[in-house]
Image: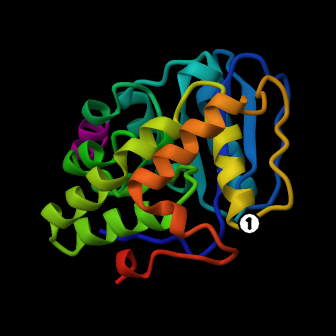
Amino acid sequence: SCRVMSLPPVMLMRTPWAPSIEVSTRSGLEIAFWAASTARFSPEAIAEAIDLPVVVQDHPASSGVQMTSDFLLALADEAPRCRVIKLEEEPTPPKAGRLVAGSADVVVLGGLGGEMLLEELGRGSHGTMTGFGFPEVLVAVVRRWFAGDRAGAAAVFDRFATLIRFENQALLNLPIRKVVYQRRGAMAHSTVRAPGVPPDPGTLADLDDVLRRTGLNGHLAAGSVLPSLLV
C-alpha cells in the first residue's frame, strides 16, 4: 500500500493556457502544456524525455481542464511514468474509487488540504500530497490506516479536523499555513504572493484559538513534532 518512488517526482498539470512545455528534474515542478487536440500525447512525450516519475495533477479549478477517469487510466496505461495522480477534482472520493478500481498500477494521492483524506483512503487512495501546517498529523493518519488501525486513523484525523478545516479557507489556506510554518521555525517569514493576502488580525486570533483547542499551541517551537502521533 505504500509505493514510494525512488526518484523525486515531476508534477504535470494539463491546462489550455500554457503554450509551451517546460521540463526539469527538480522535484515538485509543475509542467504545463497546451491542451490542443493532440494534448493527450504530450504527457507521453514528457515521460519519454525524462527519467523521473510524473505526477499528474487533476485540479480543474485551477487548470480549467476536465480529465475524466477514463482519460487518466488510458494515460497511465500508455505512459507508465504517468501513473501517479494527484486527485483534486471534487468530490474526490468517488473518482478515487473509480481510478483505483480501473487499474492496480495507478497510484492515487489526495490533496486539497487533506479535508477528505479519510474518505479517499476508504475508496482505495494511497495517501495524500498536500500542504498542512502540521504534516506529521497527516503522516500519522496514513500510517495508522495502512497498519490496519482505521479507528486510530480516524481518531487522529478527527482530533485535528478543526485545524484542517480552518486552514483550508479559500485564499487564506497558504497564508495561514505559512504563518504556522514560520512559528514552527520552518521559514523565516510568512510573506505570500498575490492573490494571497496576509491573514488579518481576526484570522490570526482565530488561529491561536484553534491551536489552543487542539493542543497544538504547545508544539510550535523550532523542530517541534508530535512524537505520540509518529509511532
| Observer-nearest of 149 and 204 | 204
| Observer-nearest of 230 and 129 | 230
Q: Secondary structure at mark 1?
A: loop
Q: Quadrant of residue 202?
A: top right
- The x, y position of residue 18, in whole percent, is 80, 23
Residue type highlighted by circle 1:
Ala
- The x, y position of residue 196, in whole percent, is 76, 28
| Horizontal arrangement in the rendering, residue 18 relative to residue 84 (left or right) | right
- The x, y position of residue 111, in whole percent, is 48, 43
| Horizontal arrangement in the rendering, residue 159 relative to residue 83 (left or right) | left
> Which quadrant of the figure contains the N terminus?
bottom left
The answer to whether residue 140 shows anywhere in this view is yes
- Residue drawn where x is 75% and y is 50% of the image: 29
- The x, y position of residue 130, in whole percent, is 54, 49
According to the picture, the residue beneath numbered tag 1 turns out to be 186
Location of residue 229 with respect to 56 vertically, above or below: below
| Observer-nearest of 199 and 175 | 199
Q: Quadrant of residue 186?
A: bottom right
> Which quadrant of the figure contains the C terminus?
bottom left
User: How many neighbours does mark 1 have within 10 angstroms: few (below 14), some (14-19), or many (20 or more)?
Assistant: some
Magenta-drawn stretch, dominant element (helix, strand or loop): helix
Task: Judge whether residue 97 is colored magenta.
Answer: yes
Task: Judge whether residue 230 is colored magenta.
Answer: no
- Residue drawn where x is 47% and y is 45% of the image: 210
Query: How many dots with numbers?
Result: 1
Location of residue 219 with respect to 205 vertically, above or below: below
Span shown in magenta? 96-102
| Horizontal arrangement in the rendering, residue 8 relative to residue 73 (left or right) | right
